[in-house]
Image: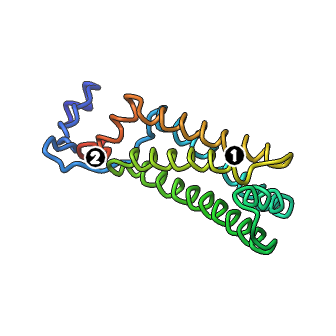
Amino acid sequence: MNEAITTGRKRDAPERPSVVNPNAAPVLVKLTPPFSVRASQFFWILSFAVGGFAVVYFFVIRKTQLPLIADVVRGVGDARAEQTYETAADIVFWIVFGVMVTVLLAQITLLVSFMSRRPKIRWWQLSTLVVQILLLLLAMDLVAIGERGEPLRLLLAAQCGLVLIALLASVLPGAIAWTARQHDIRRGPQF
C-alpha cells in the first residue's frame, strides 16, 4: 500500500458482481400503446362526445318532436283516439332514447375492455356499430323528422362515422399486435 502512495498510482477497484440476473422473472410493465390504438381511442372518445350531445339534444327537442312522431304513427292507421297516438309517440320516443343511451354506455364499457386488451372485443364493438346504423335508419323515419330533427340525423350519422373510423384504426397492424401481446413484459430489473 505504501508503494502505491509513494509512486502516485491508484489501485484498481475490484470487479463488482452483476446486478442483472439473466434468469430473472419477467416483470409486467405498462408501455404506451401504439399510435393506431391511441387514434382508435381518440375517435371513440369523439364519438362518445357526439353521442352524448345527441342524447341531450334529443331530450331537449322532445316536446316539439312528439306531435310529429304522433303524425307518423297516425299515418299507419287513423281510426284510433287521439290519446292513443300521443301515447304511441311517447313510447316510440322513449324506446329510441333508451337505445341511444344503452348503445353509448355499452360502447364506453367496450372501449375500457379494448384498452385492457380483452379478446374479441372488436366484434362486440362492431355489433354496436350495426345497432347504431339501424338506430339511425329508424330515427330518420320515426323521430328525426321536421326542422329540429335534421340536426339529430346529422349527429347520429356523425357518431356512426366516428365509430367506423375508430374501428378501422383498431384493426391496423400495430393495434392487432398490441392486443395479441396481452401484456407488456420485460425481463428482470433494468438499471
Query: Does residue 101 appear to the left or right of 74 in the view shown?
Result: left
Query: Which mark is on residue 189?
Result: 2
Outermost residue, left direction?
23
Query: Does residue 146 appear to the left or right of 171 in the view shown?
Result: right
Query: Which quadrant is the N terminus positioned in?
Result: top left
CA neighbours of label 2 inside 10 A, class few (<14), some (14 to 19), many (20+): few
What secondary structure is marked by label 2?
loop
Residue highlighted by disc 1: 140
What secondary structure is marked by label 1?
helix
Kind of residue at disc 1: Met
CA neighbours of label 1 inside 10 A, class few (<14), some (14 to 19), many (20+): some
In the depicted view, which residue is nearer to us: 187 or 180?
Answer: 180
Query: Does residue 182 appear to the left or right of 148 in the view shown?
Result: left
Kind of residue at disc 2: Pro
Above or below residue 48? Residue 77 is: below
- The quadrant holding residue 59 is bottom right
Picture residue at 69% right of the left edge, 48% below the top: 141
Picture residue at 26% right of the left edge, 26% below the top: 9
In the depicted view, which residue is nearer to us: 191 or 7?
Answer: 191
